[in-house]
Amino acid sequence: MSKGTPSRGKRQKTAHIRCRRCGNNSYHKQKSVCASCGFGATTRIRKFSWNKKTHRPKA
């Protein structure tokens, strides 16, 4: 029932550790897949066209 202060001490186990390929802290230990680069699921680097900013020349 209580969702406040007593619940805050429950999270001791980490789901993500540092990835060998990209170095980010997004490699899921149980799934054995990196959420950032896709290591463990694919040989290609996980990337999308919508998360790249357009290149703007300096004025």
Image (cartoon, helix red, strand yellow):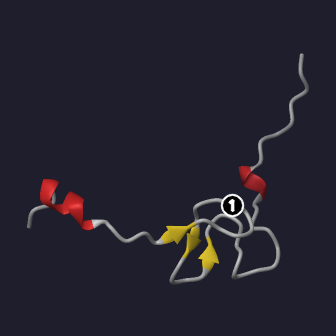
Q: Relative to residue 30, is residue 23 drawn left or right?
A: right
Give above or below for 49 relative to 31: above
Q: The N terminus lies in which quarter of the figure? A: bottom left
Most foreground residue, 36 or 47: 36
Residue furthest to the left: 1
Give above or below for 34 relative to 48: below
Image coords of residue 24 (percent x, y) = 64, 59
Image coords of residue 41 (percent x, y) = 70, 82
- The residue at the point 60 percent across, 82 percent down is 32
Q: Residues within 10 Å of mark 1 (few under 14, many from 20)?
A: few
Q: The C terminus lies in which quarter of the figure? A: top right
Most foreground residue, 24 or 1: 24
Q: Relative to residue 23, is residue 18 drawn left or right?
A: left
- The residue at the point 53 percent across, 78 percent down is 29
Q: Relative to residue 17, is residue 21 drawn left or right?
A: right
Most foreground residue, 47 or 25: 25
Residue ID for mark 1: 23
- The residue at the point 13 percent across, 59 percent down is 6
Q: Secondary structure at mark 1?
A: loop
- The residue at the point 74 percent across, 68 percent down is 21
Picture quadrant of residue 46: bottom right
Image coords of residue 40 (percent x, y) = 69, 81
Q: So how many labels did they put on this image?
A: 1
Image coords of residue 2 (percent x, y) = 9, 62
Amino acid type indicated by mark 1:
Gly
Give above or below for 32 relative to 58: below
Q: Relative to residue 43, is residue 17 drawn left or right?
A: left
